[in-house]
Amino acid sequence: MDLTLLNAAIDAAFAAALTNPQRVTPQVIAENVTLQTDTYVAPTGSGFRVVCRIKVPEANFTVTRVRNHGPDTASERDWPAEGIEAAAQAHVAKCLSQGAAYVTAKGFDADKKVILLNKLLSVKEAEALAAHPKLVALYTWFETVQGMAIAGQTMFPPAPHTFEEVIAE
């Protein structure tokens, strides 16, 4: 992604704030891109920061660049060194890994997932899904966690049933 125009907009907002520091609410400056200026007062002095956010909706990911003028130097942030697209892909990969770790932590290792999938396939082939609501609910949960992770989320719902409950069904 070419950030030249966004960096120019950030620089222009920064120059304007140097002349007249005031809060500017988030303004849409391009598709999925906002720019704002915030002023602040800290114990060591006052200042302002210019914040530019790029949302990557398909990855549920936002990257932020912050230019700061004043004592809050910790808020300064540049674009990701690896680039916006690579950072979004890394975010999704991290979310998928967290989703898989979450499912495993809830007691569903690879062997148990294969056993449950085989059971689901045989129940589905026998057209007996209605007689196995816990199995269906658990499989739906697996898909939900996976879908949430693909969408870039990292907070997942609890498992509706344990492996033992489903096998006993």
Image: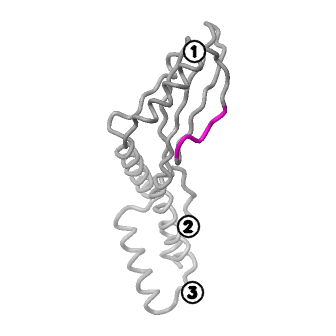
The Cα–Cα distance between marks 3 and 2, rounded to whole angstroms, is: 15 Å
Quarter-of-image position of residue 83: top left
Q: Which residues are magenta?
A: 25-30
The residue singled out by tag 3 in the image is 131
Q: Residue at x 46, y 35 (%)?
A: 6
Front position in the image: 43 or 33: 33
Q: Amino acid at mark 1?
A: Leu
Q: Quadrant of the N terminus?
A: top left
Residue 100 in the image, given as x and y percentages of width and height: 41, 56
The Cα–Cα distance between marks 1 and 2, rounded to whole angstroms, is: 58 Å
Q: Amino acid at mark 3?
A: Ala
> Above or below — where is 63 with respect to 116?
above
Residue 24 in the image, given as x and y percentages of width and height: 66, 29
What is the secondary structure assignment of the residue under circle 2?
Answer: loop
Mark sitting earlier along the chain (3/2):
3
Q: Is residue 2 left or right of residue 48?
A: left
What is the secondary structure assignment of the residue under circle 3?
Answer: helix
Mark seen at residue 18: 1
The residue singled out by tag 2 in the image is 161
The Cα–Cα distance between marks 1 and 3, rounded to whole angstroms, is: 69 Å
Q: Amino acid at mark 2?
A: His
